[in-house]
Amino acid sequence: SGSIFETLHLGKPLIVVVNEDLMDNHQCELAEELAERKHLLCARPQTLYQTLVNMNLDSIIPYPPADATAVAKILTRFLGFPSD
């Protein structure tokens, strides 16, 4: 999943080909959810060719950048550090 998010943050189009042999395949769950949100394309080895033939890169929606400011403020306050 780290490679998926790294590629999305770089703004590059991405096709995730999931490894169906993995147990508890969180990569598959993540890829399918992000594909539903139109941030990437998701395929399996047997569907990769059709995904490539049918892909429309204009339909990909850029993944929004994350803002961890709120989380950092909560952690700072929780840990008792002075806030700016």
Image (tube, grey):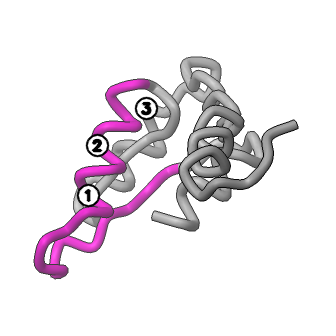
35 in the magenta segment: yes
Residue range in magenta is 15-37
Mark 1 vs mark 3: in front: 1
The front one of 61 and 68 is 68
Q: Residue at x 53, y 57 (%)?
A: 4
Dot 2 amino acid type: Glu
Instruction: Kindly indicate the quadrant of the structure image that contains residue 33.
Output: top left
**Residue 28 circle label:** 1
Residue appearing at x 45%, y 26% in the figure:
38
Residue assigned mark 2: 32
Please report contact status of discs 2 and 3: CB closer than 8 Å, yes or no.
Answer: no
Q: Residues within 10 Å of mark 1 (few under 14, many from 20)?
A: many
Quadrant of residue 37 within the rendered picture = top left
Label 2 crowding class (10 Å Cα cut-off): few <14, some 14-19, many 20+? some
> How far from the left and from the top, in percent, is residue 15?
50, 51
Above or below: residue 68 compared with residue 16:
above
The kind of secondary structure element at disc 3 is helix
Please tell me whether mark 2 or mark 3 is closer to you in this view: 2
The disc labelled 1 sits on which kind of residue? Cys
CA distance for labels 2 and 1? 6 Å
Q: Give coordinates of residue 83: x percent, y percent.
A: 79, 40
Residue 54 is labelled as 3
Horizontal side, residue 53 vs residue 65: left or right: left
Q: Residue at x 49, y 33 (%)?
A: 55
Q: Position of residue 75 (x, y in %)?
A: 58, 50
Distance from label 1 to label 3 (Cα)?
A: 20 Å
Amino acid at dot 3: Asn
